[in-house]
Image (cartoon, coloured by chain):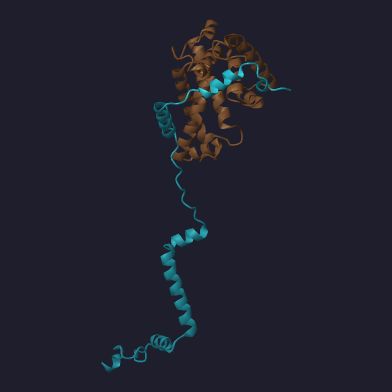
Chain colours: A cyan, B brown
Amino acid sequence: MIENRDRDDGLEAFFDDARAHKARPDSALKARLLEDALAHQPAPAAVAPARRGRLGSAIALLGGWPALTGLATATVAGVWIGVAQPTAVGDLAFGTLSGGEDYSGFMPGYGLEFGDG
Amino acid sequence: MDEVTDEALLVAYANGDARAARTLTDRLAPRVLAHAVRLLGDRAEAEDVTQEALIRLWRLAPDWRQGEAKVTTWLYRVTANLCTDRHRKAGRQVPLEAARDPPDPAPGAVAAMAGAERAAALEAALQVLPERQREAVVLRHIEGLSNPEIAEIMDIGVEAVESLTARGKRKLASLLLPRRDELGLDDD
């Protein structure tokens, strides 16, 4: 099939001129159209806050990451004291549980030798 | 942004990208205005139609479904509908004489502006055609769209497009070809 536009029936010169002399928006119309475009434009979407998982919620409950760091340090220190059990801790525990008041063995030089007062 | 498609720009526009708003306006406004002028034959009314068509596009942007239609296809359709509404409201009838005696855009400068005069003569002759013939001829022979694209814009079959353009061109030929000499077109 021969396309209509491929067969010059004398009108092609008119169509060419119409394309060459087409109406163009002037600066006033362009400004008006851009104003419309910006006025109807949706605002940029806000970034939604990240959803917390169960772990995140638990951490938040404890006071956030700083509190969790302190808690972890205390836990590790407790485990270390329990496992290593330095002599001073043993003396302190013995003194406390036996009702005695002789703390001289625990941190000597810090004025805990009450009996000598 | 020249290589970005209209559809992608429209999504960016809907996401609040101001550059997309400017690029789309620069890209689409000339096409809509030129099309509206050819369908209406009136610059002031065509400017109003351009503004209305683009506002409709901006409002639709957040709900635009990519892949379903081209932005330009949608715009050509909306522009034609808005022009039809204006014709109906005005109850406009263009007398045949209008095509035989188009307004002279530049009296006294005919020789220098032969091209502009032919363009004006064609524009006046287009106004004589029935609306659908005019739309089909403009889309096919001035905008350079394919028949399937025009069929989609006009919501008709490809054969109907061919029929409309053929009848429209026959009418244009009967109005314009007798004036070839007068309009500076020699047969030699």
Residue A116 rendering spot, x and y as whole percentages = 28, 94
**In the displayed structure, does residue B174 sit left or right of residue A76?**
right
Residue drawn at point x = 43 percent, y = 12 percent: B108
User: Which sits in the foreground, B85 or A10?
Assistant: A10
**In the displayed structure, does residue A106 sit left or right of residue B98?**
left
Q: Residue lying at the far bottom in this picture: please name it.
A: A116
User: Do we see residue A56 in this rendering?
Assistant: yes
Query: Which quarter of the figure has residue A38?
Result: top left
Residue B59 rendering spot, x and y as whole percentages = 48, 31
User: Which sits in the foreground, B80 or B187?
Assistant: B187
User: Which sits in the foreground, A111 or A46?
Assistant: A46
Image height of B181 relative to A56, above or below: above
Query: Which quarter of the figure has residue B163?
Result: top right
User: Do we see residue B93 in this rendering?
Assistant: no
Residue drawn at point x = 39 percent, y = 88 percent: A95
Residue drawn at point x = 60 percent, y = 11 percent: B177
